[in-house]
Image: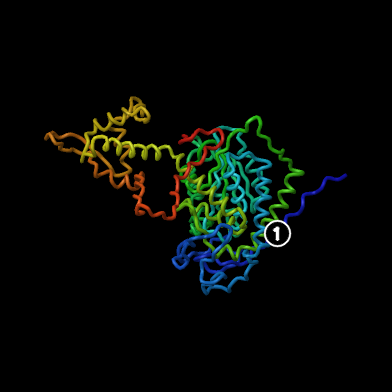
Amino acid sequence: MNDPKPPHRVQVEWPPVTVPGQPCLPNSGNGGQSPVRAGDRPADRPAVSGLIPGHLSPTGTGDRPHSDGDGPLPPRGPSNNGDQAAGEGAELLSELRAAIGRYLVLPSDEALTAVTLWVAASHLQPVLQHAPRLAIVGPTKGCGKSRVLDVLAETVHRPMITVNTSPAVVYRIIGKNPPTLLVDEADTIFGPKAGDKEDLRGLLNAGHQRNRPAWRISGPEHKPTQFPTFAMAALAGIGNLPDTIMDRAIVIRMQKRKAGERIAQFRSRSTIPALHRLRDRLAAWLTSQMTTAADLIPEMPVEDRAADTWEPLVLVADLAGGQWPALARAACAAMSRYEADQDEETALKIRLLRDIRRVFAKHGSPDALRTHALIEDLRADAEAPWAEYGTNGLNAYHLGNLLRDFGISSANVRFAEGRQAKGFTRSKFHDAWERYCPETPPPAAETTPPGQRGSFVPPAGPVAAPPAPPGLPNGPQRGR
């Protein structure tokens, strides 16, 4: 019997769409690099508040995308408000999640949700304002990082997989229909022995946001040439990637499988055709939703760059409906919070601010403390890291370096007994304390008069910190 041939991939034509802040152009243009005249989030399209999980809310005045006069209004895609469309998307994402989980052991359920939504978001590139990176990192080899790329290569939009590459190649690959970049062994590109790779790092950083082209002198006439950079990218490597890339990425921290953790074998003959069929169904559904997706900005559980990075994933989840909006936002909040704790230096500096506030409170919150007295109290705390900081414990030089980024420094201070010495004034810490480690306000006093019973609303408890991925202890981890 002849071996079955892999099915031919369905070619999905992306329809013309209106991207917020951009003219309506067909997707055969310049790969999503059309000029943006306003910002990524125009003032006339504020983010929607009060989004109901499983539902989408248009950000314009009507339920159709807006034309800004540079092109016809694109045809409306199938509405996601119908039960059939929403059910189809939720079912497809659930199938994709199960397929990914069949071949990979990811560090958490949230990570599995994130990878599923990232794959789906790659098929929505024409209407996205940001292209989140997927950083697949592990402490050693054999953690399954390359297998993640194998699965992604068969499910994302136009995969371009490479073990090593140069900026010149990437500049010329990204164009009319940007591929999804899949880079294995990224530690060989950015590691300590990789040499100068600032061009590639800059390209990957710029490509996180639409309309951030790179300019180079090109051709025999040495003309300034604009190269688009916007494209989804997944990078796998040992140890942490550069901070500027990790900051723009959804981070999957892989670990070696335990003896009892089993996965299905990834076999090209049987696995790839099944993944391709699922990929093509997913692409067809998301293509039909592009007109709706272009006019929507979902409510996010995080802010700033984390919101930019996770927004495409949450947008896909809202298009699908069902349980996916809740799953996406839970994964976003938990994984963003966990990554914030991985920045060891930042966590250490914030710990120092809290401990200094405790020392001031211990001494009755004086206007100033001598530097040596402050250091002695910090080092005396057996549960704090200051007695073992550096070679011989925290000293004045270390203290100055750790506080420099907050604009705090020591000065000559005249104390009550009239003697002058180096010290820190409490007023210099106020701004940093309010910004980085604000104190929890005390609970409001009971105002219900005696004898009257009003409705009782239990206070919201503190948000539990997300569990560390399997094999990782809680708390900051130092990358390689």
Residue 270 screen position, x and y as percent: 76, 44
Q: Give the residue drawn at x 48%, y 49%.
A: 202
- Relative depth, front residue between 348 and 377: 377
- Relative depth, front residue between 166 and 182: 182
- Relative depth, front residue between 474 and 278: 474
Q: Which residue is mark 1?
A: 11
Q: Residues within 10 Å of mark 1 (few under 14, many from 20)?
A: few
Quarter of the rendering containing residue 135: top right
- As drawn, the residue found furthest toward the front would be 451
Which secondary structure lies at badge 1?
loop
The answer to whether 478 appears left or right of 32 in the picture is left
- As drawn, the residue found furthest toward the top would be 392
Q: Give the residue drawn at x 88%, y 44%.
A: 1
Judge whether residue 1 can be spotted in this image: yes
Residue 359 screen position, x and y as percent: 28, 35
Quarter of the rendering containing residue 283: bottom right
Quarter of the rendering containing residue 282: bottom right
Q: Give the residue drawn at x 73%, y 55%.
A: 9
